[in-house]
Structure formats: structure tokens, C-alpha cells
Image (tube, grey):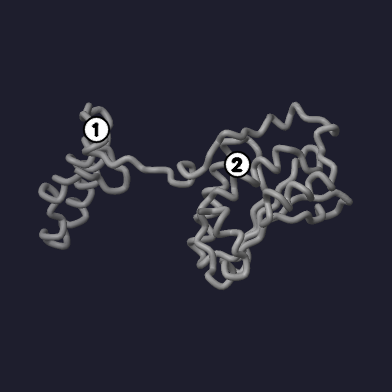
């Protein structure tokens, strides 16, 4: 049977019987505090015993959480460890611009604040706050798996901006373009109005 809140099956079976042995709400008010204390102690014992129970589990009886954010993304491309990169890994801006035009139309070159260098950036409007959070979380999971991390910005509750550059080199490397391509495969629930003005997003996330 399903167990709420991720409680282990053995622990849940014990916790379910506690209301039967802890009728604190049915006793005299002067005795309620004592009975509540007993209930608390029983709950603690149940938790401890539940941890030691060996309960057979199966995918049929215990639902497994599905990570949809990772399932939709092809991981054929991989980021290389940034520690092994030097200044020679920084891509010329004309090369980056060409790649954006041909394979990453939703991304653009933008200045890195406080420097003369550039980063690549993608901005979009999600349908609502939850859709914006879901998109950021999905992209964040990919970034963590790749060991290469973007800067996320969420403003006005659903306006999202993703900035990518190799922080250690203060420039754009192949890692940034690779991660941008992976991010473009993440399904996003866009604002219908924004999507109408940016039809390329339909192809990229479908």
C-alpha cells in the first residue's frame, strides 16, 4: 500500500495503529497532557521499530518517483571538467554567434557584468510561477549531472533568464554550448503569448 510522505512501510503500519491506543481526545481534560505524553513516547518507539523492520518491497507496491526532467534529455554530449581547461578553450565570439544562429536560436550573446567578456543567455516567460520553478529545477538537475553550472534568474514570478559561461575562465567554452543544447530539450510550460512570439521554442522543447 502507498505510504504518505515517504514513510517506510514498516514504520507506517505501526503509526497507523497509534490512534487506536492513544485516545487522548476522549479523556478528561486534566488527564489529556499525560495521555499525550504517552502517545508521543509510543510514536517514538514506533519510528525506532519501523527502522529495524525488514519489509519486502517491490515496484508494484511502492510507487517509484519518476524524474521526468532527466528522461526527456539526451545525454550523448558531455561537459568536460572545467579544471582541465585553460584560456585556449575560450571560443571566439564569431564562432559562438554562428553556433547560436544555426543550433541555438533562443540564445543570445550578452556582456558579463563588470567585464568586457561575453556570455550566452536565454530568456523566456513561463505560464506561471510553478512552471518557471519546474523549468529551473529540471535544468538545474541536468547542470548538476554535467558538473557545469549556469546562473538562473527568476523575476516577476515567471520571467526566467539563464546565463551560461565558464566562470573559471570568464568566457564561453564548448561546455556552455553543450549545456545550452541540453537545456533546450527541457519541456517548458511557456506563457501562450510569449510562445506565440517565439515559435522556435515549440520545436526545441517538443
**Above/below status of 159 relative to 38:** below
- Element type where label 1 sits in the image: loop
* Residue 154 left/right relative to 1: right
N-term mark: 1 or 2: 1
Q: Relative to residue 71, is residue 103 drawn left or right? A: right
Which residue was labeled with disc 2?
143
Identity of the residue drawn at 55% across and 48% down: 185
Q: Position of residue 169 (x, y in %)?
A: 81, 38
Crowding near pointer 2: few (<14 within 10 Å), some, many (20+)?
some
In the rendered image, the vertical position of residue 143 relative to residue 122, given as above or below? above
Tell me the quarter of the picture where residue 12 sits.
top left
* Residue 58 numbered tag: 1
Percent from the top left, x then y, of residue 131?
50, 61
| Residue at the image position 81 percent from the left and 52 percent from the top | 112
| For residue 107, above or below residue 69 | below
Between 148 and 54, the one lying in front of the other is 148
Mark 1 burial class by Cα count in 10 Å: few <14, some 14-19, many 20+: few
Horizontal side of 157 relative to 111 (left or right) equals left
Residue drawn 62% across the image and 65% down it:
198
Q: Position of residue 104 (x, y in %)?
A: 68, 51
> SS for tag 2?
helix
Q: Nearer the viewer, residue 159 or 25?
A: 159
Amino acid at each position: 500500500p502507498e505510504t504518505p510522505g515517504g514513510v517506510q512501510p514498516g514504520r507506517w503500519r505501526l503509526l497507523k495503529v497509534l490512534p487506536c491506543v492513544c485516545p487522548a481526545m476522549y479523556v478528561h481534560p486534566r488527564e489529556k497532557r499525560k495521555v499525550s505524553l504517552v502517545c508521543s513516547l509510543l510514536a517514538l518507539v514506533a519510528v525506532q521499530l519501523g527502522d529495524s523492520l525488514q519489509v519486502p518491497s517491490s515496484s508494484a507496491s511502492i510507487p517509484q518517483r519518476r524524474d521526468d526532467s532527466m528522461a526527456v534529455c539526451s545525454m550523448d554530449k558531455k561537459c568536460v571538467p572545467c579544471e582541465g581547461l585553460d584560456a585556449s578553450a575560450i571560443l571566439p565570439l564569431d564562432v559562438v554567434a554562428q553556433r547560436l544562429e544555426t543550433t541555438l536560436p533562443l540564445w543570445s550573446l550578452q556582456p558579463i557584468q563588470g567585464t568586457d567578456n561575453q556570455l550566452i543567455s536565454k530568456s523566456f516567460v513561463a505560464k506561471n510561477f510553478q512552471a518557471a520553478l519546474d523549468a529551473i529545477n529540471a535544468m538545474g538537475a541536468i547542470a548538476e549531472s554535467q558538473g557545469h553550472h549556469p546562473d538562473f534568474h527568476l523575476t516577476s514570478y515567471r520571467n526566467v533568464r539563464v546565463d551560461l559561461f565558464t566562470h573559471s575562465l570568464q568566457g564561453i567554452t564548448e561546455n556552455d554550448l553543450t549545456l545550452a543544447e541540453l537545456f533546450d530539450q527541457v519541456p517548458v510550460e511557456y506563457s501562450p503569448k510569449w510562445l506565440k512570439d517565439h515559435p522556435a521554442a515549440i520545436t526545441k522543447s517538443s
